[in-house]
Image (tube, rainbow, N blue to C red):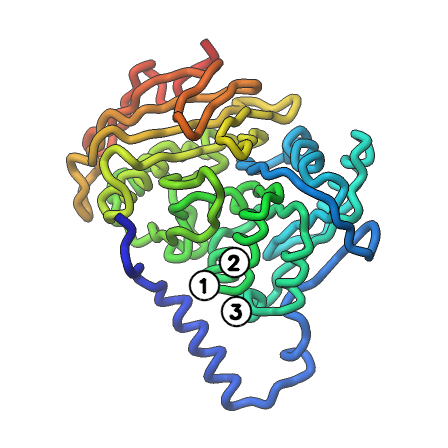
Amino acid sequence: MKKAERKKNIKKQVITCAVLAASLLLPISASAASAPYTFYKVGSTADKATSTNFGQVYMGGSTDVDEAFKWMIQKANGRDFLVIRATGTDAYNSYIYDLAKSIGKPLNSVSTIVVDDLIRAGSDSSLIDKINKAEGIFFAGGNQADYVDFLEGSPALTALNNRINQGIPFGGTSAGTMIQGDHIYDSISAGSTTLDSKTALNNPYSSLISFTDYLIQTPHNNNIQTDTHFEQQDRMGRFLTFLARNIQDGEETGTSAKGIAVNEQSALLVEKDGSAKVATQPGSTNAAVYLAKTNKAPTTYISGQPLTFNNISIYKLFNGSTFNLSTWTGSGGLAYTLNVNGGVITSSTGKVYGGNQP
């Protein structure tokens, strides 16, 4: 059962209050009245109206997967593609625009919004208008805390979910994938500290762990927890801890918690009906996507004590493997089981990350 209320982040409240207090004391300057984002665009300035097809991309970070973008481009059907990020440049514009031309599916335009003011941007009418006119939306990497601060409870989030519901292709990489599940490890309480698996397994209630729930709504992200840069940064331990927390915090039952974890240079491409396939970047190493499902609640889940959590089903997907999120069944992958006892993970294959393709 979903909680009626979720504990608000103290840091976020303090920042918001400070901004409101300052607005009462100081006159609005020219810079304060300027747009809370930077906007870049290539292609036509005129909006183009054609139909689109839904698809969702979970990408794991590092080098982008060209095939995933080609897939989104085809679903955008020659219209206007929007990249959203909280830091960085407009480098995606030329990459996506040129990639579309190279496959004979030119886009009308590609734009990038770099959100400069996380507090104001979610309510900015011109930014919301750009979301409403986009026929493909992709969230770049960075820090998912920024995206949560920008989107949570905002009109921009409402607009984004409306566009997804209307059938545009949508996706993200790294932090842009972290925000796509029902349950988000938001990294707000961690700040600049990276949460590692050992810390999470040894104390599931570590002060570094905080969540935001039910942000972005897509056809098949129910019950899902995500993680990225997965095998490369040895994140299985923290991923299993997140699943256990979803259950222990009352957001999921012992048999309903699910997860999607994506290695670098890997992507899961999900169709509207829930069927999905894996695409990887040529030359990548350890490219894979992991689908997890719980079968029972954690046995030991106490603050300050190591996690005990057994019988977690894992299905490891490789390049070309397929999976159906509706039936939670796959083909061409590797099925195995993980157990956690006293913070130590064991695997039915003898390897935490399963091993090679069968």
Q: Earlier in the sequence, mark 2 or mark 3?
A: 3
- Name the outermost residue toward the top: 358
Vertically, is 173 above or below 17?
A: above
| Secondary element type, mark 1 | loop
Residue at point 24%, 44% (across, down): 203
Residue indicated by mark 3: 119
Tell me residue 8's x, y (percent).
Answer: 34, 64
Residue indicated by mark 1: 153
Residue at point 56%, 89% (across, down): 26
Q: Mark 2 belongs to which amino acid?
A: Leu
Q: Residues within 10 Å of mark 1 (few under 14, many from 20)?
A: few
User: The C terminus is located in which quarter?
Assistant: top left
Q: Mark 1 belongs to which amino acid?
A: Gly
Vertically, is 158 above or below 234?
A: below
Kindly identify which numbered label has been placed on residue 157.
2
| Secondary element type, mark 2 | helix
Tell me residue 163's x, y (percent).
Answer: 59, 51
**Would you say the residues marked 2 and 3 are in contact, meaning their CB atoms lie under 8 Å apart?**
no
Query: Would you say 307 lies left or right of 47 here?
Result: left
Vertically, is 74 above or below 311?
A: below
For the residue pair 340 and 150, the one nearer the viewer reads as 150
Q: Select label 3 or label 1 by which is in front.
A: 1
**Would you say the residues marked 1 and 2 are in contact, meaning their CB atoms lie under 8 Å apart?**
yes
Query: Would you say 83 lies left or right of 145 here?
Result: right
